[in-house]
Amino acid sequence: MNTQENNKLIAEFMGMQKTDIGWYDAEKLIDLWYTTDNTFDELLFNKSWDWLKPVVKKCREESNEEDSHWEAIYYTLEECDRDVTHQAVVEFIKWYNENN
């Protein structure tokens, strides 16, 4: 999957919906400090920690603490490497979608 497809996978995991005017976040789970808007033209999970942090939180909530898929995300956070964390989140969501 390419970055755009990965971001789409994440958006759908977060409950966002694609509309005629962009990606709509009805629950405002992606609560950004610099805007009050909840419709986005571009998905920035791969470019911004502000976008990625709520996804990591939801991954944690959807897993149990001993889950190796959650642990993979947890360890990437120690590295503070957004790209690696983004990829671990994508792998978690793929696993989650197959098993739930």
Image (cartoon, rainbow, N blue to C red):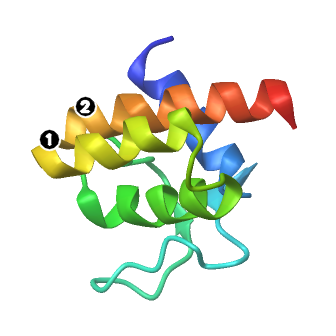
Residue 4 lies, in percent from the top left, at: 46, 26
Vertical relation: 20 (above or below) 96: below
Res 63 label: none
The image shows a total of numbered marks equal to: 2
Q: Nearer the viewer, residue 61 or 93?
A: 61
Horizontal placement of 3 versus 64: left or right? Answer: left
Image quadrant assignment for residue 24: bottom right
For the residues labelled 1 and 2, say whether their Cβ atoms are less than 8 Å apart: yes
Q: Which residue appears at 47% of the width and 38% of the height? A: 89
Vertical relation: 54 (above or below) 70: below
Q: Which residue appears at 69% of the width and 47% of the height? A: 13
Q: Looking at numbered disc 1 in the image, what kind of residue is underneath it?
A: Asp
Is the C terminus in the top left, top right, bottom left or bottom right quadrant?
Answer: top right
Q: Which residue appears at 68% of the width and 26% of the height? A: 95
In this view, the residue farthest toward the front is 66
Horizontal placement of 52 versus 34: left or right? Answer: right
Q: Nearer the viewer, residue 17 or 29?
A: 29
Does residue 35 appear in this view? yes
Question: Label 2 crowding class (10 Å Cα cut-off): few <14, some 14-19, many 20+?
Answer: some
Q: Secondary structure at mark 2?
A: helix
Does residue 47 appear in this view? no
Residue 49 lies, in percent from the top left, at: 25, 59
Q: Nearer the viewer, residue 85 or 6?
A: 85
Residue 48 lies, in percent from the top left, at: 25, 55
Question: Label 1 crowding class (10 Å Cα cut-off): few <14, some 14-19, many 20+?
Answer: few
**Distance CA(mark 1)–CA(mark 2):** 5 Å
Q: Which residue appears at 43% of the width and 47% of the height? A: 42
Q: Looking at numbered disc 2 in the image, what kind of residue is underneath it?
A: Val
Q: Which residue is mark 2?
A: 84
Q: Which residue is mark 1?
A: 81
Residue 74 lies, in percent from the top left, at: 35, 49
